[in-house]
Image (cartoon, rainbow, N blue to C red):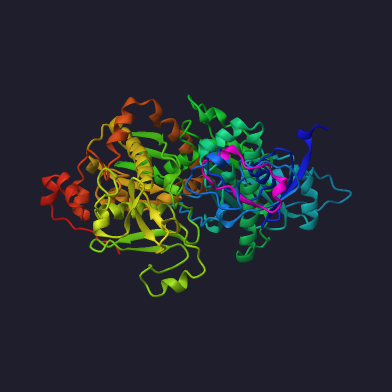
Amino acid sequence: MSDSQIEYRVEFAPSGLSASVTEGTTVLDAARQAGADLDSTCGGRGLCGRCQIVPTTRDALTPWTSTEDEYTGRRPIVDGQRLGCAALVHGNLKVEIPAASQVHKQVVRKTVNVGDIEIDPLVRLHYVELEKAELSSELRGLAEQIGASLLTDFDIDGVRVDAHVLPLIADAAKRGDNAITVAVRSGRDVCAVYPGYVDRAFGVAIDVGSTTVAGHLIDLGSGEVVASNGVMNPQIRFGDDLMSRVSYVMMNPGGEVELTRSIRTALDAMVGELVAAAAETVETLRPIDRASVLDMTIVGNPIMHHVILGIDPTPLGQAPFLLATDSAMTVRAADLQIDAPFSSVYFLPCIAGHVGADTAGAILAEGPHRSEELQLLVDVGTNAEIVFGNSAHVLAASSPTGPAFEGAQISAGMRATAGAIERVRIDRETFEPRVRVIGADVWSDDPEFTMQTMKLDISGICGSGIIEVMGELFLAGLIDVDGTVRSDGPSKTDRIFADGRTFSYRLFGDSDDPTQNINITQDDVRAIQLAKAALRAGIDLLCEHNGTTDPNAIGSVRLAGAFGAHIDPLYAKVLGLVPDVPVERVSSVGNAAGAGAARALLSGAQRAEIEAAVRRVQKIETATEVRFQELFVNAMGFPHTTEPMPNLAAETVLPAAQERAAGASARQRTGRRRSRS
């Protein structure tokens, strides 16, 4: 055996997980094999510093590497720690993953509202009484008896019994004293059998996002959501954003298998947790278990869609971004290693290489194709999916916003976990901030704040907080229209301090060491500018293609997704994320993609509707549009470099320079001005 084939055991604390790996494997790859929660947003390139580990047996790792020597990321390498992506295994090893390097359980705030639809599921339950078998009788087979009963009692003709159900009929009939309940899919296929009478059937609708996975167990007869669950997408350990994961597959033979295995394992676990939760709270004649799940629907971006199906995602990482299929698909749950023995899984159709089944779900839920007025639907995430139009014409595009809105690329950015700052207000006179954090119910200026946050680690700011602090800094006049943290800031408040050649704002903390506080840096502002400019340029591009130049012509703006659901509409306008429509037309609609998955679960007509609707959507590829770059540059300013904002000027008090830029019409308007508390 050569040295390269020697295997060593790596154990991870505090999880207790372990893996046997060959010599020369990075600790990060060993963690991935073990399933340990070791974070990495750069895909193991030595850029983010999130994969730091504490080796307890130091001689079992290779010496300090050039990657670690040259590392200059925002998270300095802590004394005694190593970069998991750089340190190579050289012996049996025990490793501690510190809290800062763990993929924390996120506060997944995705709910579902299916709206008003006619419930018409593809799977229905039917009670059947079989004839009692006697030696002298000339009875037909059990499957044929079922078919005859369904025809006589329910007018269901041409029944076929699935092959995996046939072996189960005799036992079910025996246990039910010749009375059984069968599930019939699509009006003819018997896909499940239970002893006795079963009164309720269930399905699962799942939205697989790049960061979070949200699932809902739904009564197929009533549409009632009986259990919901949300987890972090375990693929995060292969990279925070989609392109990092595609790069991981490109650089690691068999990487696509690892990605598929990790998400399928998470989906299977989610189904188990949903039925377990429902079993404790929902009354049924038959206890709810995995066999109660008779149908599933899944939405996700094109890369998630392909990875779940076991399709290599690398063609989606480079032009021409070719999908293996853009059609709706139905497979058995067992084919995806999901333990739901009687269930099929329906994948909503994709639209284009960067506009996936999640966007199809959002379209189905919000209905721009059913609307007479123009609707702008935006799912804000690592890639922003944008849909614009009405019943006459619908356009769609994807814009590469990157992960800044979700906390990555922000110096104090973090996911929406307990202790993350989620809301910010800055006093216009004193420039003092007050914040709210996840896990506490009061603002930081409330006497109860210290008590409520005593056990919380307030260590960063999540997406909604990032949007608000940027908006507040602009409205307070501490950053300019062009996004520069003002150099005269220190003369106004000691919270503005010199930070190298630029300036930063101290948001939270009072340490004399600036690195121990939560600060908003000039680089943070630039990261948000780049992200919001990409989003706005995509929106403006679709508006131009539709011939819409007046924001007042847009009937509604709907912010979707887990992140979009927590953006205050006013701050979305202050940053220029969306056009200057009246603020009352801007709303957060929650998990529209998940709602679309639920609608498709509950109605065959809804599936037919979205399959037809996506074929009529005009796809706009931002990467090949020459105009996109010009729109991107124009959108860099707060709220916008070139567009006047008369509606916004009437809705809040803008800094003086921006008020003038809004034009005389804005100064003359006397509409209400909104205050935020």
Residue beneath the point at 63% across and 58% down: 199
| Residue 553 visible in the displayed image | yes
Q: Is residue 273 magenta?
A: no
Magenta stretch in the rendered image: 46-67
Residue beneath the point at 37% across and 59% down: 507
Q: Is residue 259 left or right of residue 441?
A: right
Residue 84 % position (x, y)? 62, 45
Residue 329, by quadrant, is top right
**Residue in front for this viewpoint, 590 or 577:** 577
**Residue in front for this viewpoint, 485 or 582:** 485
Which residue, as the protein is rendered here, is positioned at the far right? Answer: 135
Q: Is residue 342 left or right of residue 467?
A: right
Q: Is residue 59 magenta?
A: yes
Q: Pick the quarter of the image with the C terminus.
A: bottom left
Residue 504 % position (x, y)? 34, 52
**Residue in front for this viewpoint, 268 or 477:** 477
Residue beneath the point at 30% across and 63% down: 432
Residue 109 % position (x, y)? 48, 56
| Residue 312 visible in the displayed image | no
Q: Pick the quarter of the image with the N terminus.
A: top right
**Residue in front for this viewpoint, 167 or 196:** 167
Q: Is residue 307 left or right of residue 590?
A: right
| Depicted 353 relative to depicted 414: above or below | above
Residue beneath the point at 72% across and 58% down: 196
Residue 197, by quadrant, is bottom right
Residue 51 % position (x, y)? 58, 47
Q: How many marks?
A: 0
